[in-house]
Image (cartoon, rainbow, N blue to C red):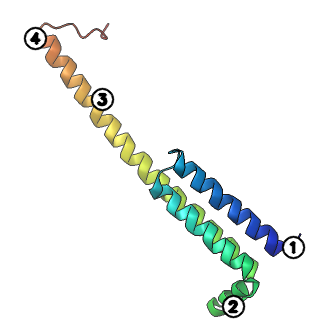
Amino acid sequence: MSASLLGAVAAILVFVFIVILLRRGLLKEKYAVLWLLFAAVTVVLALVPGALRWISDLLGVEIPANLIFFATITLLILVSIQMNYELSRHEARIRRLAEEVALLRERLDEKGGDTGGSP
């Protein structure tokens, strides 16, 4: 099996896997966009082998494999930044919700109600 064919098959499998995760509701669209774009670019580069050499020459990169490594590292950094952003946002929401629950429990205690969950 040639490297181009192997790359195309792998990219198509990633594409199909992402679509399946989307249809089952296991992956949100905002996360899938980057992976679908990555798979589509990989399919194009695998099916048009001269494209990677042309892009490398255009950007002044000596070895096309270095361009692939750079693009992959950049993709992983972008995914990491996106995940850190989402994690920070969710931590802030959880903290706010915990504070709201504590305030509501305090109000119930002041009114003499039983919260049922406090020791």
The residue where tag 2 is placed is: 54
Q: Earlier in the sequence, mark 2 or mark 3?
A: 2
Does 17 sit above or below residue 40?
above
Q: Quadrant of the N terminus?
A: bottom right
| Label 4: which secondary element | loop
Which residue ends up furthest to the right in the rendered image?
1
User: Which residue, given by chain and number where applicable, does mark 4 sit on?
Assistant: 111
Q: Residue at x 68, y 72 (%)?
A: 43
Q: Name the residue: 27% across, 36% down.
A: 96
- Inter-mark Cα distance, 3 to 4: 20 Å
Q: For the residue carrying disc 2, how many other residues have a C-alpha within 10 Å: few (<14), some (14-19), or many (20+)?
A: few
Bin the neighbour count of mark 1 within 10 Å (Cα to Cα): few under 14, some 14-19, many 20 and up.
Answer: few
Q: Which residue is mark 1?
A: 2
From the viewer's side, name the closer residue of 51 and 90: 51
- Which is nearer the N-term, disc 3 or disc 4? 3
Q: Point out residue 53 in the picture as x, y percentages from the top left corner.
A: 73, 87
Query: How far is disc 2 from disc 4 in space, using C-alphas?
Result: 74 Å
Foreground label between 2 and 4: 2
- Give neighbour class at mark 3: few <14, some 14-19, many 20+ (Cα, 10 Å): few
Q: Amino acid at mark 2?
A: Trp
Q: Quadrant of residue 3?
A: bottom right
Number of the front mark, 4 or 1: 1
Give the foreground label among 1 and 2: 1
| Up/down of 6 relative to 117, above or below | below
Spatial CA span between label 2 and label 3: 55 Å
Which label is found at residue 98? 3
Q: Is residue 117 left or right of residue 84?
A: left
**Residues marked 2 and 3 touching at CB (< 8 Å):** no
Spatial separation of the CA atoms under disc 1 and disc 2: 20 Å
